[in-house]
């Protein structure tokens, strides 16, 4: 295969890669902490940066060094992503439980109890999104790098493919995070609807994370 075609196609593949189920479940859960579009799309960008960082570093080792010693461990990495998803979902449910139990017995009728507003993170801090992206990159890097190694013989072109792929995934998650954040706009939905979406997101994280762990650990 000519090197130019996969290089041109890398951004498209990366953009589509961002919309895989485990990525969407994780980022969908992360943006439930936001009620501002700007912060949500920044989470998407930082997820993409973390994802690209891991894929590029592992690619550097495997492509430049022609090393495949990690090949037998990527199933464990996928299982680790499953555990991470379960942790994200459980922690979000734990936050809801703590807030509900801490609710005053008589909150009065003048102002309704704003449960969802207490689950919002207003800070411009994206460490969680970056860390989740790092984990996803670790899990997904194996097949991607090995495929590139078999199709592109030049080490330089291989690394360029991974970088362009990474930029595509950043763009894809930018779009996904923006779309997922829309229901959490104060102008579009009520607190009750937003809380329901947070619960749904948490359950999806736990369910899909359990599936990933069961699927990958059963292979060993």
Image (cartoon, rainbow, N blue to C red):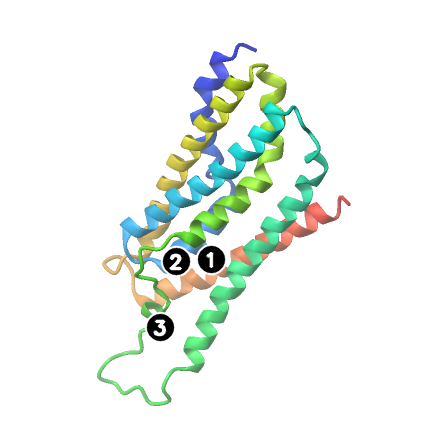
Res 136 → quadrant? top right
Tag on residue 70?
A: none
**Quadrant of the rendered image containing residue 75:** top right
Q: Specify which label sits upstream in the sequence, 2 or 1.
A: 2
According to the image, label 3 marks what residue? 115
- From mark 2 to mark 1, how far is it between C-alphas? 8 Å
Q: Secondary structure at mark 1?
A: helix
Point out the image quarter for the C terminus.
Answer: top right
Instruction: Report the disc number at residue 32.
Output: 2
**Separation of residues labelled 2 and 3 (CA atoms):** 13 Å
Neighbour tally class for label 2: few under 14, some 14-19, many 20 plus, Cα within 10 Å = many
- Please state if 147 lies on the left or on the right of 121 as rendered: right
Q: Residues within 10 Å of mark 1 (few under 14, many from 20)?
A: many
Point 29% across, 65% down: residue: 190
Q: Is residue 152 above or below residue 183?
A: above
Query: Is 113 located above or below residue 175 in the figure?
Result: below
Q: Secondary structure at mark 3?
A: loop
On screen, residue 211 versus residue 85, left or right, reads: right
Label 1 or label 3, whichever comes before in sequence order: 3
Estimate how packed mark 3 is, as few (under 14), some (14 to 19) or many (20 or more) residues with alpha carbons within 10 Å: some
Q: In the rendering, at what x and y percent does residue 53 appear?
A: 48, 38
Are the residues tagged 2 and 1 within 8 Å (C-beta)? Answer: yes
Q: Which mark is residue 201?
A: 1
Marks 2 and 3 in Cβ contact (< 8 Å): no
The residue positioned farthest toward the top in the image shown = 2
Above or below, comparing residue 88 to residue 102 in the picture: above
Q: Is residue 29 left or right of residue 146?
A: left
């Amino acid at each position: 295969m000519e090197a130019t075609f996969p290089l041109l196609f890398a951004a498209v593949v990366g953009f589509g890669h961002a919309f895989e189920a485990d990525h969407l479940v994780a980022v969908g859960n992360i943006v439930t902490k936001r009620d501002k579009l700007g912060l949500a799309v920044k989470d998407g960008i930082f997820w993409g940066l973390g994802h690209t960082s891991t894929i590029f570093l592992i690619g550097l080792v495997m492509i430049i060094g022609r090393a495949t010693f990690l090949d037998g461990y990527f199933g464990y990495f996928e299982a680790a992503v499953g555990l991470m998803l379960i942790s994200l979902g459980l922690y979000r449910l734990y936050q809801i439980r703590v807030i509900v139990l801490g609710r005053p017995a008589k909150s009065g009728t003048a102002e309704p109890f704003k449960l969802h507003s207490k689950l919002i993170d207003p800070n411009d801090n994206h460490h969680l999104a970056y860390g989740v992206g790092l984990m996803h990159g670790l899990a997904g890097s194996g097949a991607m790098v090995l495929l590139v190694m078999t199709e592109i013989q030049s080490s330089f072109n291989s690394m360029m493919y991974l970088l362009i792929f990474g930029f595509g995934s950043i763009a894809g998650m930018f779009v996904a995070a923006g779309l997922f954040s829309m229901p959490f706009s104060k102008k579009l939905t009520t607190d009750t609807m937003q809380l329901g979406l947070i619960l749904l997101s948490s359950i999806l994280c736990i369910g899909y994370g359990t599936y990933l762990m069961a699927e990958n650990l059963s292979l060993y």
